[in-house]
Amino acid sequence: MAHATTAPSETPAQVTLENLFETPRGRDLLTCIQCGLCAGTCPYGEVIEWAPRRIISMLREGQIEEVFASDSLLACVTCYACMAKCSRGLRLTEVLLPLVKEQIFVRLPEVPAELQKALSNTLRYGNPQGESARKRAAWAASAGVPIRVLPQDPRPVDVLWFVECYTSFHPRGQDNCRATAKVLHALGVDFAILGHEEKCAGECARLAGETGLFETLTDQNMKVLGKYQFNRLVTSGAHAYDAFLHGYQAAGLKVPVEHTTPFFAARLDALKPLLTKKLGYTVTYHDACVLGRHNGFFEEPRRLLGAIPGVKLVEMTHNRVNSICCGGGGGGMWLDTFYKAKGYERLADRRVKEAVATGADVLAVSCPYEVSRFEDSLKVLGFDKKMVVRDVVELLAEALGS
Amino acid sequence: MNILVLMKMVPDIVEELEVGPDGKSLDPEFQRPIVSERDEHALEQALLLKERCGGTVTALALDTQDADDVLFTALAKGCDRAVKVAGIDGPLATTEVASLLAKVIPAVPGLAPSDLILTGCWAIDDLDGMVGPLLAERLGMPYLGIVTGVGAKAGEGRVTVAKEYSGGVRGEFGVTLPAVLGIQASEKPPRYVPVAKVRATMKSGKIDSVPAAAPDEASQISILQMKKPEAAGRAEMLEGGPEEVAAKVLDLLSARGLV
């Protein structure tokens, strides 16, 4: 299982398409046996013209430019399914796809409007929503527990909580924030946030192919992180967790990085006696791609849910490594309109149909993107009276009772 | 076709705006300038024309906070040259900007004669959109505003200009060059330029700095007062069941003598 101590992946700065076959991970790609599992397991396999198998084949033949000319890889939601299933264990989503998507992005004749807006906003305001950075910690006023904001109180702290964008600005994300603050407080954790100094971690920018934006955000965040003393970085953003682990550590981030869900799971002994309120929910858990398939946190969220009184956990057909992506990764968060125009099925719709089929009344998640994506799908499909979406941490906070 | 695009910075209304201590200007502490959206459309229209007919595009901005970022971005998008007018002393009124530009543009080598001068047809701090017409008048050129498309063929000495009217009516005008056009919307949305390309342009590209000329005409309009809108009233949410709420509504209306 991957933890914060895992060696960081090679970054695009180290591996390029030109030197790909001279680096160990790149050379591995040559061992592709063209089995096609990647195309078969891809949630958009029927619409992506260039599955990793075909990209590798084109690379070997020196015809990679042809791959770059197509926009079909905009449907790659970087869900790590191909990488998890690859019979040769190739680092497809980690190494190959970002390099290819970067080249496609710079050649796009037109960046889809919604994605363009999100990227421009992230560059200017540090969040894809285009909200004022000044309002990033506005949710803290309604947290119900004291929240230390480092720019106002820069004393050293144990846990630096990197809140992230959807959690900071989306109304339902803010519910997650308030819940996280409540649980951290109940556990007596010494924590603080960066407030207006925090900017988007940028993982989606990188995996959409906008590497320059990711590098800019990395520079800006590293500069801010460098101002404060803390022992560990805990983030609510599943994608941010991935960015810190697989990008920021290579850029010099030295402290251990954790996501809130495994962070609380590791403290379950202290947390469990505090979970006193019986909830009476049947819950099904959706494995977030980056937490599950990419980083191996399959059991942690389930252990947390299992510790809540009155929670009955049921599984969807596709769970753990087989989980179906919500469609929000790799820029997919801002490509719904583009996919719709192309006639692609919305992956979140596919997922909630499966969730509703379990008979559960709560769909539990641990990635902030999923709340709005699944809530939208439940409404569109007419299931919003049957099922609600809740972050695992929201359920923990509710079970605290007080 | 050689096109000059005039770009200006305006207050970013995403940020909370505060009135400064003088009571007639925005507090600079709470401001972060952003390029005027209409000017971004003017730039896009110029780049589309260049792609169709060839020629050059020059972006020009007054040297105010963050103008360099905007000019480098314009270069990264495909502009051939970026010029900033340095030595601007304090905020300028519309007539002062037009008067200054009318002196600077002919004085800078390579800027005049341009076939087309494009700028936004208005900006959030210039709803009258007077910079374009005032500049055109001073340069002795025709002006057309609220433009939503420009058609041109190389070497014709004229362009066709599309304007939209209410009720879905579209007008097409012919105008001889050189001319000044106030762009409302480019034919396509302004393009995205990858950050890496902007960063590379910042390293390799350059912005020509030219001195400002003193405006020879002072504005006859001055700002008397600037203040935030006052909350005129407030909403009151009535709680309770339908019967209860109905009774409360009746009480409220009776108390105001409305029933």
Image (cartoon, coloured by chain):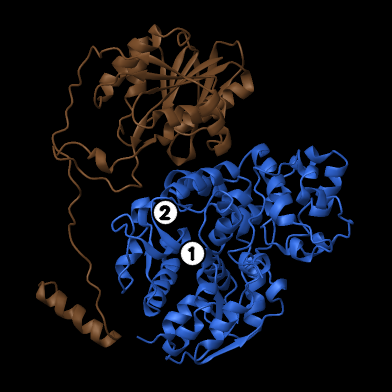
Chain colours: A blue, B brown
Residue at 41% x, 50% y is: A224
Q: In the rendered image of this protein, does residue A111 appear above or below residue A387? A: above
| Residue at mark 2 | A198
Q: Position of residue A276 (x, y in %)?
A: 42, 91
Q: Quadrant of the N terminus of chain A?
A: bottom right
Residue A229 figure quarter: bottom left
- First in sequence: mark 2 vs mark 1: 2
| Residue at mark 1 | A235
Front-most of A7 and A245?
Answer: A7
Asked if one can make out residue A218 in the rendered structure from this viewpoint, the answer is: yes
Amino acid bearing label 2: Glu
Q: Position of residue A31 (x, y in %)?
A: 87, 54
Q: How far, Cα to Cα, is label 2 from label 1?
A: 12 Å
Front-most of A337 and B111?
Answer: B111
Q: Quadrant of the C terminus of chain A?
A: bottom left
The chain carrying label 2 is: A
Residue at 63% x, 51% y is: A207
Q: Position of residue A238 (x, y in %)?
A: 55, 64
Please count the marks in the image.
2
| Left/right of residue B161 with respect to residue A347 in the rendered view | left
